[in-house]
Image (spheres, rainbow, N blue to C red):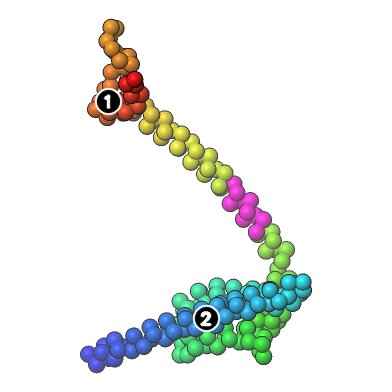
Amino acid sequence: APTHLLLALRARPLEMLGDYLTALLIAVLGYIYPVYLCFKAVEKHKRKPEALRGWCIYWLVMGLYTVGVQISDRFVFWVPMYCEAKVGFVLYLWHPKTQGALYIYESFVAPFLARHEPDIDRHIDETQTSVGDVVVKHSQATGNFVREKFAQMLAALPQAVPQQPGAQGSGYVPRSATEAAAMAYSQPKPRSD
């Protein structure tokens, strides 16, 4: 049993290196390099927006891939060569010879979204309405809470007491040292002409 434990402890750093290397490769090959290519396409085709369709499709598919990987990583991380497959898939998506993003978009994404577009739009509208209602309700409650707490804070502040008739000064006697210091610094300095 102890030998299995030692082998497992030795193998884990290699797995972690694989995870970090995979994340780095996907960041560079899946995001940074395509961002640069997209920049070049935008600058080169300023007057032909239809030339940018391929990059819009790539980023749409890449967004779906990113969401899918966030879910699948939790369940299939143990599959052999999973990390390498992710890197290969990202390369497949943007490589000019494979144009995998275009294939996936035209074969799966566009037909699915076109078929379900009215339902998706309805759900988005319903969600925006319900979120708006919740925001309005909670912002009103928050406003009332802040007003109430501010009023309580003001009521808790010490009140200035009028001085006895005939005493010098502003007419008020401070109730605490803090109030006296505040009054001393807030009074104008006498002028020495």
Q: Amino acid at mark 2?
A: Val
User: In the shown orientation, is residue 85 left or right of residue 12?
Assistant: right
Residue of label 2: 28
Residue drawn at x 24%, y 27% as measured from the top left: 177
Hey, which residue is sitting farthest left in the picture?
A: 2
**Residue 127 belongs to magenta span:** yes
Quadrant housing the N terminus: bottom left
In the figure, residue 121 lies in which quadrant? bottom right
In the figure, residue 45 lies in which quadrant? bottom right
Q: Is residue 159 at least partly visible in the picture?
A: no
Q: Is the stretch drawn in magenta largely helix, strand or loop?
A: helix
Hey, which residue is sitting farthest top in the picture?
A: 166
Residue drawn at x 50%, y 74% as measured from the top left: 70
Residue 4: image location, x then y, percent: 27, 91
User: In the shown orientation, is residue 161 left or right of residue 26?
Assistant: left
Tag of residue 180: 1
Query: Quick one: 122 or 141, which is closer to the camera?
Result: 141
* Residue range of the region highlighted in magenta in the rendering: 124-133
Q: Amino acid at mark 1?
A: Ala
User: In the shown orientation, is residue 147 left or right of residue 113?
Assistant: left
**Residue 60 belongs to magenta span:** no
Residue 47: image location, x then y, percent: 77, 71
* Label 1: which secondary element: helix
Answer few, some or many: residues within 10 Å of disc 2's Cα (few below 14, many 20 plus, some between 14 and 19).
Answer: few
In the figure, residue 165 lies in which quadrant? top left
Tag of residue 35: none
